[in-house]
């Protein structure tokens, strides 16, 4: 399951791959048992389909990994934004206590940080 409680595509892939392997093994056993030869065109078609499926599964796996990375990135951005907002609030609070030029600079910086954190 992913972070949203949805089943992951790779969970289904393992089931599909096991079924595909069992199908091909059963097919080969059946062909050997009956003594029939496979149609050359069918074998070529299966090979082409298998190659396309392999590419599809590779792309799907890469996209899943990319999605996980993006989710982690988003979570880390949220943490940074919260920290930035807290620092801005702290500077604004300290600026209220300081009537000097430094206090004015802390207030301006605090406002800028809070504004930046909300974006």
Image (cartoon, rainbow, N blue to C red):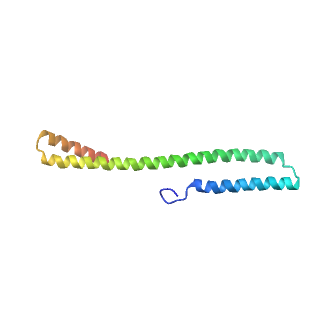
Question: In the image as oriented, which residue stretches furthest toward the right?
Answer: 35
Residue 39 screen position, x and y as percent: 84, 48
Q: Which residue shows up at 81% across the image and 54% down it?
A: 29
Residue 104 vs residue 17, the one in the foreground? 17
Residue 78 screen position, x and y as percent: 37, 50
Residue 51 screen position, x and y as percent: 69, 44
- Residue 71 appears in the rendering: yes
Q: Which residue shows up at 23% across the image and 49% down it?
A: 89
Question: In the image as oriented, which residue stretches furthest toward the left?
Answer: 99
Q: Which residue shows up at 76% across the image and 53% down it?
A: 25
Residue 86 screen position, x and y as percent: 27, 49
Picture quadrant where residue 30 is located = bottom right
Q: Total marks drawn? A: 0
- Residue 118 appears in the rendering: no
Q: Which residue shows up at 61% across the image and 56% down it?
A: 12
Position of residue 105 in the picture relative to residue 53 (left or right): left
Position of residue 44 in the picture relative to residue 112 (left or right): right
Picture quadrant where residue 98 is located = top left
Q: Is residue 118 above or below residue 6?
A: above
Residue 92 vs residue 2, the one in the foreground? 2
């Amino acid at each position: 399951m992913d972070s949203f409680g949805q089943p992951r595509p790779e969970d289904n892939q393992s089931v599909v791959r096991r079924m595909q392997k069992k199908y091909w093994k059963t097919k080969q056993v059946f062909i050997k048992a009956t003594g029939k030869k496979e149609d050359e065109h069918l074998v070529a078609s299966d090979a082409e389909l298998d190659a396309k499926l392999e590419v599809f599964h590779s792309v799907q796996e890469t996209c899943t990994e990319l999605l996980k990375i993006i989710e982690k990135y988003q979570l880390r951005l949220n943490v940074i934004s919260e920290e930035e907002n807290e620092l801005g609030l702290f500077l604004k609070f300290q600026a209220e206590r300081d009537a000097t030029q430094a206090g004015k600079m802390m207030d301006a910086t605090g406002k800028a940080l809070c504004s930046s954190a909300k974006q």
